[in-house]
Image: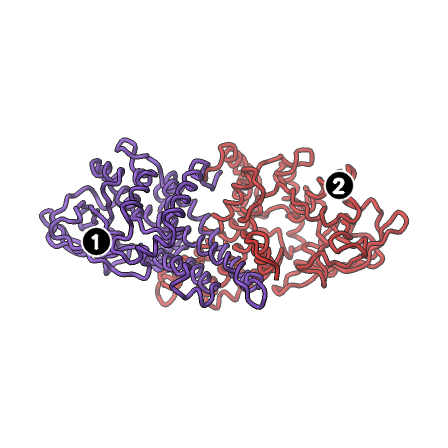
Chain colours: A red, B purple
Amino acid sequence: MDYRYPPEAEAFRQQVRGWLEENLTDEVKGLDNRGDIEPDDLLILKGWNKKLAEERMVAISWPEEFGGRAAGVMDQVVLAEEMHRVGAPGPLNPIGLNNIAPSIMTYGTEEQKEQYLKPMLSGEHIWCQGFSEPEAGSDLASLRTRAVEDGDDFVINGQKVWNTLGHYADYCELLVRTDPDAPKHAGISCLLIDMKTPGIDVRPLTTMTGAKEFAEIFFEDVRVPKSALLGPLNQGWMVAMNTLSNERAGIANLHLGVRRKIAGLIDEAKSRVVDGKPLTENPVVRSRLAKAYMMGEMQKAVGDVSIAGAANGEPPGAESSIVKICWTEIEHLVAETSAAVLGADALTDRWGDNRLYTRATSIAGGTTQVNRNIVARRVLGLPKG
Amino acid sequence: METNYSAEQQAFRDSLRRYLSDKCDQSFIRENWDEVVPHTEELWGNLVEMGVTALLVPEQSGGLGMGMVDMGVVMEELGRRVNPAPVLASCVGATSAAAIYHCNDLLATLADGSKIGTVAFEEADKTLLSWQQPGVSIKSGKLNGTKVRVLDAMAADVLFVTAADGVYLIAADADGVTIEATEIVDGSRRIADVVFEDAAAEKVGELADFAPVIDRLLVGLSADALGAAEMALFTSLEYAKEREQFGVPVGSFQAVQHMLAEMFQQVEMAKAGLHYALWALDDAEAEEGHRAAVLIKAFIAEEFPHVGAEAVQIFGGAGFTWEYDIHLFYKRLLSAELLLGGSDVWLEELARIAIDR
């Protein structure tokens, strides 16, 4: 066992730290790169994204020819740690960079790579995924949005939902059914489409927090050229589920984010005097904060197992399937802890928002229940009911 | 970065696992359950032969000079078989104390297994948060007072005792030492009250230097608990695959699957935290080693009783019987929860680390 980072990663840390000190301005610091971004903030974030891209600090795991550094896992983790340390927002396009780009790199034509990857990296083009539908959530492969071949075009009809950044997006990685007679995973194709194409109607979807974080996208006789196809026809499931991404910093971002929240809650508790005594002398408050702190640190430990495995070239193992479940539960715990510690003040401002926001963590990206099914069947080998 | 045991450590683990499942399976445990000294000379002799007693003894004192990561391998395996050998007390506790206080003659006998030692540092009216203010007094080289929950004191030849002005070494059969076993629900582990009445003892060093002994014990016990929890999970998982109701395995029911998936999640988290703590005790600063030790003990105390309880639940009525083994693991997890301080103690220590510093 050895939990130290390699010396090269520590050297990269110094380089990143120096660059951030020189380039991170107060205007940028602390802005949220997700969710409901104000138009003014979006401009600032785009400028920041461009600056990061020029320094090749957006998607360092990408090959150098596409603007990355071909960086290994530990460098990615170091970058994430340093960005979190100073409150530097990440790039605008996390879904594009982490989920869509690997498919384009693996299956795209030279034209597609040339056209899409660099503007995605710089933040010039925002991407969304068009996967889920009202009737295809956890059971994504039952999706029904159709694309019919017509001469040199596909004609698309249907509806998508839960499109993160959909209302800002310039492009979309869209899953459509191209062979309705094939078994459900086999008749799906993947298209890369321009969101300005006539017939596309984007409606922002307001979440329970009041934010416009997602969109619904409606397609009515939307005509795109056949060159929009990514990878082979009817093999879109394989194309979109491409897990060849070298990006692993997301694992670190989970614990970095939740531990920063816990530290923030502890600071907030320390600043309060209640009934004439510091709030942090209250044994109930101490116990609740200690438990949240403990779980945050355990999340780091679980994440480190995944990160070390990835750094050593091992395929994702059992632990990666539980990193997400653990994280969502800790997000829930921190939200509940904020209520126990701050009382009715936790109904306001950021802790109020956070209490609501964290409901999404156990739903988005695979519900906890679906993840438990996966663990039970694939890891524990339990029979299907 | 590497979070797993090395190839050598895994080979060591495999040989230990083979020995324990061949010679010390549950029927051995059941025969010795509730015995005052529940291990046998044969078991102890075999552990000596495999190097367990010499593991943490420095090389210059005739030991193997290895670290807590290696000892973690041993403790996980002993936990998997709810083994009663006094390894935590003697090979971790007393051996670490003997090394810290340079008790070289004793170290040689601990290394070759001819002596068994333990450490006495808990008192009835204190938690481990105030172990540095012991009530056991010392006057003209004689100890007076009572230590409680002393691991394997009945098997021990020598005891390290924390007292008002330092740490003392005393033979278990010395005049003025009375050892009274405490019966606990976990019959695979032995603890005792030790009463000192004008018992002449030798001072070996200062109290503050004793802190790493406690951190190592916390992590050693956590490793033992991880082994027991893994077996609770594994045993109930196998049962869920075999046991049929309504014409199908009960493990095909989603409610049961989610219980097992959640148990797996707790076990994996604990394994991650434990491995970090083992490494931190060997290779990080003492303060970080302490933090990691407290984290894993607090987590074990908070989460593992539930893992054991769910395992019993999956067995249904059979789980409540003496006949099925699952209760052995449950009991081992209950004692791991509460011995050396439960979550009340260690969450408060975490609060001091996270809030007050």
**Element under disc 1:** loop
Question: Dot 1, how many residues are within 10 Å of its Cα: few (below 14), some (14-19), or many (20+)?
Answer: many
Residue B326, image x, y percentages: 42, 59
Whether residue A147 is visible, yes or no, is yes
B159 left or right of A168?
left
How many marks the image carries: the answer is 2
Question: Dot 2, how many residues are within 10 Å of its Cα: few (below 14), some (14-19), or many (20+)?
Answer: many
**Element under disc 2:** loop
The amino acid marked with disc number 1 is: Pro
Residue A312, image x, y percentages: 54, 37
Q: Vertical placement of A315 versus A263: above or below? A: above
Whether residue A271 is visible, yes or no, is no
* Chain hosting mark 1: B
Q: Nearer the viewer, residue B54 or A10?
A: B54
A310 left or right of B9?
right
Q: Which of A95 and B264 is in front in this view?
A: B264
Q: Are the numbered discs 2 and 1 placed on the same chain, yes or no?
A: no
Q: Residue B25 carries which label?
A: none
Reading the image, the residue beneath label 2 is A108
Q: Where on the picture, by quarter, is residue A66? A: top right
Residue B124, image x, y percentages: 23, 60
* Chain hosting mark 2: A
Q: Which residue is drawn at 79% across and 60% down?
A: A158
Q: Vertical placement of A98 versus A130: above or below? A: above
The residues tagged by marks 2 and 1 sit, at their Cα atoms, a distance apart of: 71 Å
Reading the image, the residue beneath label 1 is B134
Q: Residue furthest top?
A: B60
Residue B208, image x, y percentages: 25, 45
The amino acid marked with disc number 2 is: Gly
Q: Which residue is drawn at 69% across and 62% down?
A: A205
Q: Which of A58 and B96 is in front in this view?
A: B96
Q: Do the residues labelled 2 and 1 touch (CB within 8 Å)?
A: no
